[in-house]
Image (cartoon, rainbow, N blue to C red):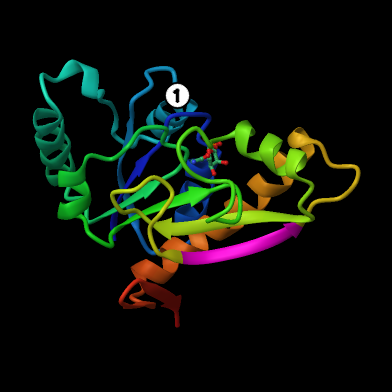
Amino acid sequence: MNLAVFASGRGSNLGAILEAIRKGDLPARLSVVISNNASAGALELARSNHIPAVRIRQQEYPSEEAFSEALISLLAQHEVDFIALAGYMRMIPPDVIARFRNRITNIHPALLPSFGGSGMYGMRVHEAVIRSGVKISGVTVHLVDEEYDHGPIVMQRAIEVTANDDPVSLAAKVQKLEHEMYPQALRAFAEGRVMMKGTTVWIR
Ligand code: GAR
């Protein structure tokens, strides 16, 4: 599996993916890291691991079609066959989704379909979870389709939200779980163990 990771932020999930590859727990090659954000920790992390790191933004292109073409040719240049979104805070253009149908995953820091959708990212998710009073949260890995936080769910795990939790402590617990889960989910794809029937996905 020739992987591209798209990330806008710190890049801790990228770090977990890199570590899993290094340890032999994820049979993949990380071909390129792509970000919209020049100061993303993820780009720095990629560069320090000698992985091509590219910043590309839709605003720099005259149209969405032109941006899609640029992204698709960047991915082809790096021989990418699978995309993992890891804290990427932009929509993937429909042409790219169509080209990589069922080969793009996203990790979300809550149990979708709750606490997802536009504007629900990072700390905002954990704040909403705490405000709601739910007693469990967790992590979702899902396939990416044209709707935000919407595609078929591949893997989900729950953690308890305790009376002592605040958004910061919850975020820390969720991120720890993310770092275990994302490499495992990607490994299932790399090993051809992800099965699909309609929009239902499961791992063998
Ligand atoms: C992760 O918690 C990820 O689930 C979240 O952004 C964080 C990125 O952290 N993604 C979303 O909220 C997407 N809706 P990282 O840069 O340290 O990997």
Question: In percent of the image, x 52 and y 46: which residue is there?
Answer: 116
Q: Position of residue 13 (x, y in %)?
A: 52, 44
52 left or right of 64?
right
Q: Which residues are magenta?
A: 154-159
Which image quadrant: the N terminus? bottom left
Residue bearing the label numbered 1? 40
Q: Would you say 54 lies left or right of 115 here?
A: left
At 49% across and 32% down in the image, what residue appears? Answer: 119
Q: Amino acid at mark 1?
A: Ala
- Mark 1 lies within 8 Å of ligand 1 (Cβ measured): yes
Extreme right residue here?
164
Looking at the image, residue 90 lies above or below residue 14: above
Viewed as shown, does residue 61 lie left or right of 154?
left
Above or below 99: residue 130: above
Whether 67 is drawn above or below 181: the answer is: above
Whether residue 32 sits left or right of residue 169 in the image: it is left
Give the camera-side residue of 193 and 195. 195
Whether residue 12 appears in magenta in the rendering, the answer is no
- Residue at horizontal 53 percent and vertical 36 percent from the top: 121
Q: Position of residue 125 (x, y in %)?
A: 62, 39
Residue 168, image x, y percentages: 75, 33
Helix or strand or loop: what does disc 1 sit on?
loop
